Amino acid sequence: MYTVKDKSYKLELEATMLNINGAHNRKLKEACRTLKEYAIYTDKIRKYAEKMSLEDAVERAICECIEEGILEEFLKKHRAEAKAMSIFEYDQEKHLRMEREEAWEEGRREGEENTKRIFKLSLMGKTSKEIAEVCGIPEEKVKQILE
């Protein structure tokens, strides 16, 4: 915790996200056994979730991991919590992925609409500078689209 008397100070945080799914970041996973085992566990959940309900997929992954000695002690001791958290995290990941896909699709549609608008304004005799002002984009972008 910290206290700041002068409210003009701000804290900036930069985080690096690393993908530990599948074959990504092998060196990192080899350096940390628990991280490697967690990646195996989550990969199993993803694989099984394609063929069965998420709850069944998590249960199967937990059973297999315990049998294979992957996160064995933790999963035996905290099975219920691990199951609940895995279902929550997987649902959250799926939700975020769907939101990203929807945002991408919305951006694509907006891009198409802007392109149509640019062509329509051009056909009406507007200059690239006028179109740029109306659309709120750089004139170079308008010229690029019209080429």
Image: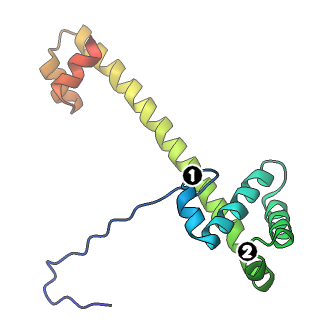
Residue 134, percent from left and from top: 19, 28
Q: Tell me what residue is drawn at x 61 percent, y 54 percent.
A: 21
Q: Is residue 78 above or below residue 66?
A: below
Way the structure is coloured: rainbow
Residue 73, percent from left and from top: 76, 82
Q: Quadrant of residue 43?
A: bottom right
Q: Tell me what residue is drawn at x 72 percent, y 54 percent.
A: 46
Residue 70, percent from left and from top: 76, 70
The amino acid marked with disc number 2 is: Leu
Q: Is residue 114 above or below residue 126?
A: below
Going from N to C along the chain, the mark reached first, 1 or 2, is 1
The residue under label 1 is: 24
Q: Is residue 116 above or below residue 58?
A: above
Q: Quadrant of residue 42?
A: bottom right
Crowding at mark 1 (Cα within 10 Å: few <14, some 14-19, many 20+):
few
The residue under label 2 is: 71
Residue 54, percent from left and from top: 78, 59
Determine which of the numbered discs, if any, sits on residue 68 in the image: none
